[in-house]
Image (spheres, rainbow, N blue to C red):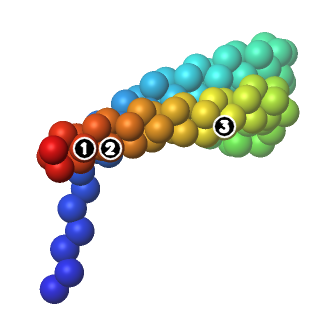
């Protein structure tokens, strides 16, 4: 039976990056939904759509057009921060190994 262990450093890195970037992505989504003009909500309600239909058919398609450019920037930030965190972790690992060998 093969068991795999996740190091505590990797787990902390994953949780920290998830919380940090998750909050930023949530704010992007919230801002995009709020950027949809209020008249669109009123028209959807007047058409007799339920809240879920209004969000799925009217609001989200317009919000996606607003959110695509900043979301691309956010993906680049995630890639950059992951690379930086792994580089720092690698140097710490080499330092610990060097100390252990000596």
Q: Position of residue 17 (x, y in %)?
A: 44, 33
Residue 94's label in the rendered image is 2
The Cα–Cα distance between marks 3 and 2, rounded to whole angstroms, is 29 Å
The local secondary structure at tag 3 comes to: helix
User: In the shown orientation, is residue 52 left or right of residue 96?
Assistant: right
Residue placed furthest toward the bottom: 1
User: Which residue is rendered at x = 47% and y = 38% of the image?
Assistant: 87
User: In the shown orientation, is residue 82 left or right of residue 49?
Assistant: left
Q: Which quadrant of the structure image shows residue 4?
A: bottom left
Judging by the rendered image, the residue that carries numbered circle 3 is 75
The Cα–Cα distance between marks 2 and 1, rounded to whole angstroms, is 6 Å
The Cα–Cα distance between marks 1 and 3, rounded to whole angstroms, is 35 Å
Task: Assess whether mark 1 and mark 2 are in contact (beta carbons under 8 angstroms).
Answer: yes
Does residue 48 appear in this view?
A: no
Which quarter of the image is occupied by the N terminus? Answer: bottom left
Judging by the rendered image, the residue that carries numbered circle 1 is 98
Question: Could you say which is closer to the camera, residue 48 or residue 56?
Answer: 56
Does residue 87 appear in this view?
A: yes
Question: Could you say which is closer to the camera, residue 7 or residue 65?
Answer: 7
Q: Judge depth for marks 3 and 2 and give the one in front.
A: 2
């Amino acid at each position: 039976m093969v068991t795999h262990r996740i190091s505590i450093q990797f787990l902390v890195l994953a949780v920290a990056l998830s919380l940090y970037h998750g909050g930023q992505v949530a704010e992007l989504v919230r801002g995009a939904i709020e950027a949809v003009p209020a008249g669109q909500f009123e028209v959807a309600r007047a058409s007799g759509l339920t809240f879920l239909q209004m969000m799925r058919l009217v609001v989200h398609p317009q919000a996606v057009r607003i959110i695509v450019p900043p979301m691309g920037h956010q993906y680049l930030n995630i890639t950059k921060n992951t690379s930086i965190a792994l580089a720092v972790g690698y140097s710490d690992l080499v330092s610990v190994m060097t100390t252990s060998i000596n």
